[in-house]
Each structure stands twice: as structure tokens, then as C-alpha cells.
Amino acid sequence: MMESPYDDGSSMGSLSDADSFANRSKEGAVPEPNGGGGDNDNDNDDDTHGSSSGHQDSVHSSADTVADAIARQDTKAACHLRVLVIALFVFMSVFVPIVIFMTAKSHEVNAFEQEFKALATKVVDSFEFNVARKLGAIDSLDISVTSYASGTGATFPRVTMPDFDLRAANTLALSDTFSVFLVPLVSEQGRKEYEEYTVLNQGWIEEAKSRDSSSTARRELAEAAEPIEEFLFKFDEAGKSVPVSGEGPFFPIWQNAPVTESFVNFDLASIESSREGILAMVGSEEAVLGKVGSISEWEDVFEEAFSELVKSQGSTFFADQPISSIFYPVFDRFGDGASFVALISTVIFWHTFFEGILPSNAEGVVCVVENECGQSFTYQINGQDPEFLGDGDRHDSNYNSQARRYNVSSIQQSDSFTFRESSIPLNKDYCPYTLTVYPSDTLRDEFITYKPALYTACVALAFILISAVAITYDCVVQRRLKAVLESALESRAIVSSLFPANVRDRLFEQEGQPAGEKSGAGVAGGEMVEKAPANKDHNMASHPAKLRLKSFLHEGPKGMANNASVMQSKPIADLFPHSTVLFADIAGFTAWSSEREPAQVFMLLQTIFHFFDNIARKWGVFKVETIGDCYVAVTGLPDPQPDHAIRMTKFARECLRKVTDLTHKLESTLGPDTGDLSMRFGLHSGPVTAGVLRGEKSQFQLFGDTVNTASRMESTGKKENIQISQTTADLLVEAGKEAWIRPRDELVSIKGKGQIQTYWVNLKMGPANSGSSTNGTDPESSERSSNGEDGDSKGYGQSGMSRPQMTSLMLSQNRRTKRLVDWQTDILARLLKPIVAQRDRKANAEFLSDPSNVLEKGDCVLDEVAESLVLPKFDPHAAKAQSGTAAADLSPAVMSQLRDFVETIAARYHANPFHNFEHASHVTMSASKLLNRIVIPEDVNYQRKSAKAIASDLHDYTYGITSDPLTQFTVLFCALIHDVEHAGVSNSQLGAENPAMADKYRNRSLAEQNSVDVAWDTLMQPEYHNLQQCIFTNESELKRFRQLVVNSVMATDIFDKESKSLRNSRWDKAFHSDPQAELVVSEEETINLKATIVIEHIIQAADVAHTMQHWHVYTKWNERLFEEMYHAYENGRSVKDPSEGWYNGELWFFDNYVIPLAKKLDECNVFGVSSDEGLQYAMANRSEWAVKGKEMVDEMLQRIKQKEQ
């Protein structure tokens, strides 16, 4: 049967109808069906149409809803993000610059406040020290007056103190005062008797002036001087002297310094301002600091007399500056029940309280001094010198909140100066003074700059640019997002028109699923999340060497590796590309250490490097190691530090400032020249290889060219300077620190690199200055100093000044001398303590009342030289007492008298280039080193022997020297006095110039015998009664002390042929005798003879110790001796030009005296390695002099002539 043609037609018709429906649906018209379809057909058609139309509306509605939701969601999210970003940028643009400004400003303000706080503390501490020093100096003179009066039995007011001008000169120098007056208390009843006494005893004036007979000016004043007033006087309104009226008491000036007879018998209480202070002192029996005045006020009273005094003292420059008087009570005796009998009045300039207390680069510290009497004045300290701003409080009131106040009257006993047991306090009720310290704009301007505003502007501009970029980026993103959204809506519309809703939704859901969920890899995705920390650890472990190196540096080595583990383990090392290496070396250390004991050397290094370590922690600097006196450090490892060059520069700068302060403080402990030590610093930046060298002792090390270059920066640098390479300088410039550096004038030759440009770091933050140093240090002079050239001798040999004037100038202006006095006092006190410890065990020790009359001296000192000294036998009880010297202490009176004695001896040394107080201190230090290096025998069994047995063996081995504290003290005492009043010429010339002295001392060892007599007569003065009792208590000890002094000092004359022959004979008898020969002396006498020789050799070796020390030490003192002898030749005090035979003379001196002496020290067999050290230095110096000596003589002569020009 054939198929109906309608089957296909129906199918086609269905498709056609569908297409037609679609088309109609788009057009919005529904055509009627063709043919008689009846109602059913129509209904079906209508139903079909309605169903299709509803379906299409549903599709459109769903598509629109999804599109709107996506659009709203994306738009909302983008809007929120845009608002958040804009708000964040606005906030950061305002907040961050403000924070940066406030932080930078706060940093500057804090730096300013911290600097001022440190400077104010320094000012207050130094001011308090100066007050204590001035009162201590006056207190010493006060003790001398009371000691003299009580020792001689004299009663006030009829007391005239011999050598008052010399003792007062020490007070003037040490307290920086203008004048000193001794003012007795005179009652109305005793007035006439006192006036008669002054007329009869005015001879002290002529005696004092005669001591300066070489001064033409003084001689003219003495010839023109009128006699003193024979009555107590004051000045009337016309300026004429008239007798003082009233019932008294009166306070007339008696002895004074500088000596001015016009002052004698002037009633000091007749001046109203002085009278108030004196009455306050009398009522409280305390020291009183008087009202403020000026030199012009005194000139109004004394007119021409006081003007001449001012002119002679060279103080007219300070005529308009404030002064005050100190009134110090004097009592008739020490202890309870003492009565006030006199006063010491001194005139001080207030500027002396503020001189030299701040570094040279510190400026702008304002000091206001005021008292409750309505007086005030103001100074501004600029570096070492104070500037007087005027009367009244002249500080800037803007700095009131930073004021630092100090009550001058609150000073108590100070460690800086030891007062006597009944120390006189400073009166707190009469015109109490207050010191207030303020900063100034000058100091503030060094720290407060425009940089915070500049930083703020730069950051704000950066945020504005970033905001502009962000807005532009947002616009671009918005356009792109709009295009993407439109494309997505079109895609959704197309999909919605092609697929049913459920299929479309599933497609959208799959499109929105994460990639892991689409693939069904949800677990894999979880594993990725879990592995993230492992990946982080892996990244951290990608540099295992750095991690292990950091662990080693922070935690240290875990244990000692054996050979196998070292070879098998991986090295802990890595390259650090950004770092800065520092080398620092103590300039002059080798020469300095050659003069000292090992313990003193290590004390210096430990102190300096301890503070360096603290500073390193402060700046985040890693200390690598110390090699001798060299300090090595690095920044930039183990943790990276972008500012490694800045950190290291700050570290080096602070270390340089600290070491200067430390060396000055240590000089009183470690001896002369310690304060002259400084450091050289060298810095270089670049990559370094750092790692741990394993072995017996694992050690962290740096390697590479950066380390070598840093070392060259230090070695080619100069004293008190920081030298940096071009690389480090570039890093500082990039960081905006170009003001920190200045180029070195000359190129530096570096091995392997040739001539390179280097830079100096300025210690003071300021504009760069390529021409000169801004830190107050001249690199050229620093280099000369570090190379052994010494500038201290520039002041010697000045013409136009008398010897006492030069000595006074040295004491008042040379702080070095004051430090030497402190050191000499300290070292002698340490040796006095064992003497006291031994004596304390003797309960019934009797003291000599007048030791000056006990000794029976010979016609001259040389007659007292003994063949051998008698040292005490070993005493186990005394040895035990000596071992406990830590508990022994010296009374304040002894300490005060000891200091006064050292000051007096220092004042009596002449200002010679060589034979001066500084050389005596060098001899003392060398003798101390030899005493401390007397070693113990190696064959003593210290484990099995008792302390008593060991002490006995040590006594025998050292011939009794180590167990006799008096001998040890005397050796250093002789080193101090052995050249006192040396005239700077040979003994033969001295005899020609002074026939009386030549006759007195039989024309032999004139200078040495005179030194003994001068020092001995000074020590025997009544005012040193307590010190005498500390050294000796009975006639036996006094004679032994005298014998030690005579033998030791006379041994320093090495050119007296007869004395030298006797010493050589004693040496042969003691050390070179034939063991087979019959003993002519007992064993005890032999030990005493050897002890005598050892003692004399100690002082002889110490006297020429510079020849047996470092080359720089030898050349320093050799040039000073040459200068002294050349000046004598120029002045007609020597017939031979020393430059003609100096070269050969030094060679002869080495061959015939120095080297044989060093060999004898070794043969004494008690000095251990010290004798070897001295011999090695002596031979090395002799060899170097043989090569360089002729050229050096020419250079020394040229320097002397340049100095004279």
C-alpha cells in the first residue's frame, strides 16, 4: 500500500507552524488557522498560542531578572570598592604625611632634648666638680695654716706662715682664683699688739719677692714699693687710708698672694659687701660664697695698687666679668673644741666654673647664676669657652620647661677631692646661689631643621600622584567592566532565548563553580591548601646556609665538631651583598703599652671595648672580633639592614666621642699620656663572605675585598678621624647624608687599587667642609701625634717669663699637670696603705714630735750615700697585715697633705723641655712598672706550701724588697723628686753659674743633691705632720727612709765618675764574686748589698726608661732633651752645640750605658720578662737610630728654629 502524502506534509507542517509561530511571536500577531477547523481546532490553536506566549514571557522575565541581579551586584561591589579605595587614599594622603611630619619632628625634638639633657648634666656635674675643686684647694691651704700653727705652737693673730706665697700659688693655680688673703681675727684689746707685730714681721714680703729675683718687672715693683701701713686702716671717701675705728672685731689682711704690700693691714670688713659675708661666716663657722662684684669695684678701693696686681696677673681681659669672694674659716686646731681665729679669702672669676667643661662642638648652652640677694648674671657656653652675656637673667623664656637647676650650697663631700675629717661645709643661708641651665636657639638650630616639612611635602605629593594614577585606573576599569557586563548580558539573553530555564540555570551554576569542584577534585584543592605552609617552609629553607649562619650568630655553636664531622658537614657560610665593615685602632697604643704593666693595658682595652659593645647594641652593629687594640664590626648581617652605612657611621662617630672621654678619665688611674690616646676608624661598604670556621674553637669570620679595603681605610687614616671609602660615601649621599662627610684633600694609596679618593666623617652634623675639619680635630696634627711627634713641648723655652711665672702658668693653664698630680697622689697613696696596715698592728707605736731635729746629716748629701741599705728581716705578722691592705685606709688629713706635697713639688719643677714634672711622672710610672714586675721564683711549690712559707720564699728571692712597703714607697717617692728644681743645664755648668752651690756640694752631683735637700726640707715642714707619721714613726724608720732617699736619688747621676766606680764595685762584689773565694761578708750583708743594687738600678732604669721603650716614646723624650740642651747652648749656658755630636752621642749612650744597664737588670734575676723587654727595645731603638738618627737631628734642629721664629 502506498504511503499517504500527508505524513510528510504533517511533519513539514509542524515545522512550518513552529517557524511561523516563532515569527509571529516576534511580530506580536496570531493568525487564524486555514480550513474549517471547527471550535476544537480553534480552541486548540488558542491554547497552543497561549501556552507558547506564556512560556516566552517567562523566558524573558527570567533573563531580565538575572541580568538585573548581576548588574546590580557587580555595580554595587565596584561602587563599594571604589569608595573604599578613594577613602583609603584620602585618609592615607592626610594621615601618613602628618604622621611622618610628627615622627620626624618628634625625632628632631627628642634628639635636641636628649642632647641638651646630656649637655646640661655635663655642665651641672662639671660645675659641681669645679666648686668641689676650688673648695678643696682652699681647704688644703686651710689645713696647712692650721697645721703650721698647731705644729709650731704659734697663736693667732700673730702667725706668719713661711713660704705662704708658694703654697698660695698652688691654691691659685688649682682653684683658678685671682688672689688669696690670710685674714686673722683681731680684737680691740689685741689691736695694738697686732699692729706692732705686723711692723716687726713684714720681712716675709721681701723674702717672697726675692724668690722671683729674675723678673725685672717684679724687681721694679719691689724697689718702688712703700712700707706697709703701721695701723689697721680703711679708705675714706677721698680714697686716703685712715685708721679703722670702732670696737671690733677687725679683719685685717696679713699675708697675701700675689704679694701686694698695699693690702697689708687693710680691714677687709670695711667693705660693706665683704663685711656681710664675713659676719655670716663668723656666725655659722662655715665657708661663705659672697655677693657678686667685679674687678672695677676693687679698683675703686685700691686704685693703682690693685690695677698693678691685675696687670701683673694678666686678668684685665675679665675686668667687666662677675667675681665673688669665698670666705673660709681657719681654726686654731683640729677636732672638737676648735676656735675660729682667722679666715682665708679668695677672689674667683665666675667664668672659671664654665671653662673647658663641654666638647668643642657643643654650642648654645645658657647658664644663669642667681642668688637670693637679688643678683644674677648669664653665661653662654660655646665649646670650650664661656661667653658672658651680661647681668641679669638673659635666657630665652621659651625654654623654661627644659630648665635644669642646681643649688650651689648643696655640695657635699666629693670623691673628686678628699677633705679633711672635719671638712667645712658651704653656708646654705647667706645669699644661696642657684645655677640654672637652659638651651638656646643656637643649640636648637643644630637639630631642628626643615627636613620634616620636606619629608611631609614629598610624601603628600607621592600620595597625590598615586591617587591620580588610581583614579585613572578606576576609570579604565569601569569602562572595561561596563563592556564586560554588556557582553555578559547579551550572552545571557542569547542563552535564555535558546535553552529552557532549568538548563540555563545549570549552565550558569557550572560556570560559577570553582575549577576544582568542576573537575570533582575537591580533595586535591584541599591538599593544595594544606601544602601551603609546607611551601612556605620550603621557601625559607631555600637558603639553608643563611638560616644556619643566623642560628650560629644568635645562639652560638652547639658543640665541638671532630675532624670527621668538620669534613663531612656542609659549611655555614654565605655571601651578604650589602654590608659595611669597620676597623678601629687605638693610635699610639703600641708606644703607650710599652710603658705599662699588662694589667693596665688590659684595663684600658676592656674599658674601651666594653663601651663599644654597648654602643654596638644600640645601633644594631654586629661585633666580629678584637685583634689586639683593633676593633672589627659589621652591619648588614646576619639580618639585612638597608641603612647599614648610616648605622655604622653613627656607631663610629659615637665611639670616637666616647673614647676621648674615657681616656681622660682613665689617666688618673693608668698614668701619663693616657689622655692623649685616641682612635682611627676606617669604613668600607660592599659584599662580604661571612661564615663560621670550625675547629677547636669555632669562630665567625669575614672575608673578601670589602674587609681588606676597610682595613686599609683604618691604617691610612688619621688620629681622631673616621675615614670612609668612596662606596660608603656614595651610600651616605644617596641617603641624604652628604653633610656628614667631606673629601680628603689628598688621594690615598691602597695596595692593589692605586690612588683612590676617600672621605672624612664630620663629628659635628653640619655643612660639608672640604677644606678643614669640622669636628675640632686637625687631621694633620693628629697624624703627627699618632706618628710619635709630640706637641706638648711647644710651651717650653718661652722667653720673657720668669721661672716662677712659667711654673704658675703651667699649673693654672695645663690641665695635664693637674691630672698628673692626681695620678701621683693616687699611686703614692696606694703604697702608703701597706705601711699603715703594718703599723696598725703595733698598738703602742710612738710618733716623733719633731723629725727635723733627729737626723744628723753630713756636710753634704753625697756624704750620706751608704755602701748597702739595711732592709728589715722577714716578719710573718707584717706580711699578713700587708696582705690585707684593702681594709687599710688613709685619713683625710693624710690624703690632703699628700696631695699638697705633690702639688708643691710639681710647682717647684722648672718649665724645662726634659727635666720637668711630666718627665718625673714618666719616671714614676716606669719605676712602678719595674716594682710590679719583680717576679716570684718558678721553683716555689705554691700548692703544698703555706701562705707564710710562700711569703718567706718571696722575701728571700727578691732580697726583701717585696715584703717592705717602705722601700717600695720610697722608690716612687724618689722618682717624683729626683729632678726637682733642675736648672736645665749640666752639673758643671750649674757649678759655674752658682759657685755657692758648687762649694756647698763640693762640685759633685749638684742638681741631685739640691733636689734631695729641696724635697726633704719641704717634707719636714710642720704642716705635713700627719703625712710624716704615715711614712715613719720612730727614729729608726726615719733614718732608713732618709738613707733610701739619698741612695736612690744620688744613683741617678750617672756621669759622676767616683760614684759610678763605687756602684760598679758593689755590683761586682754582689753578683760577680768568685764562689770559691772566702766570704768577706755575711749572707745577710750580701742580700742587703743586692737589694741596694736592685733599688738603685730600678731608679736608674726608670730615669732612662724612654730608651728601653717603644721607638715613639724614645724619640719624644730624646727630642725634648735635645731641645733643652740646645736652648742652654743658645743662651750661653753651654759651650758646645749639641747638634754637632748628638747622633754619635746617642750611639755611645746606648752602647755604654743603656744596653749594659738592661743586661744588668736581667742579671739581677728578679725582673722576669721586663728585663728582656727592656733589652729588646733598647737594641731595636739603637739600630733604628743608627739608620735614621742623622736625619732626625736635622729635623729636630729645624723644628726648634721654626718654633723660635
Image: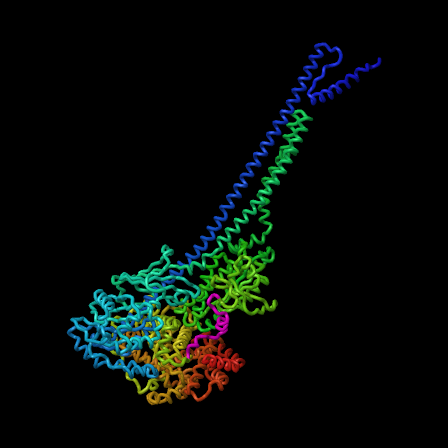
First to last magenta residue range: 774-796
Residue 250 in the figure: left or right of residue 1021: left
Q: How many marks?
A: 0
Q: Nearer the viewer, residue 796 or 102?
A: 102
From the top left corner, tell me how far across and down residue 960 is, in percent. 37, 76
Residue 801 in the figure: left or right of residue 1029: right
Can residue 342 be seen by looking at this rendering?
yes
Q: Residue at x 50, y 46 (%)?
A: 94
Can residue 934 be seen by looking at this rendering?
no
Q: Residue furthest right?
A: 1
From the top left corner, tell me how far across and down residue 266 is, in percent. 23, 75
Q: Nearer the viewer, residue 15 or 987?
A: 15
Asked if residue 793 lies in the magenta stretch, the reply is yes
Residue 343 in the figure: left or right of residue 811: left
Which quadrant of the view contains residue 3?
A: top right
Q: How is the image coloured?
A: rainbow
Residue 1047 sits above or below residue 650 on the image: below
Asked if residue 808 lies in the magenta stretch, the reply is no
Which quadrant of the view contains residue 441?
A: bottom left
From the top left corner, tell me how far across and down residue 93 is, in percent. 52, 46
Residue 1038 sits above or below residue 358 on the image: below
Q: Nearer the viewer, residue 109 or 556?
A: 109
Quarter of the image where the N terminus is located:
top right
From the top left corner, tell me how far across and down residue 1051 is, in percent. 39, 82
Q: Nearer the viewer, residue 1195 or 535?
A: 1195
Q: Residue furthest front?
A: 238
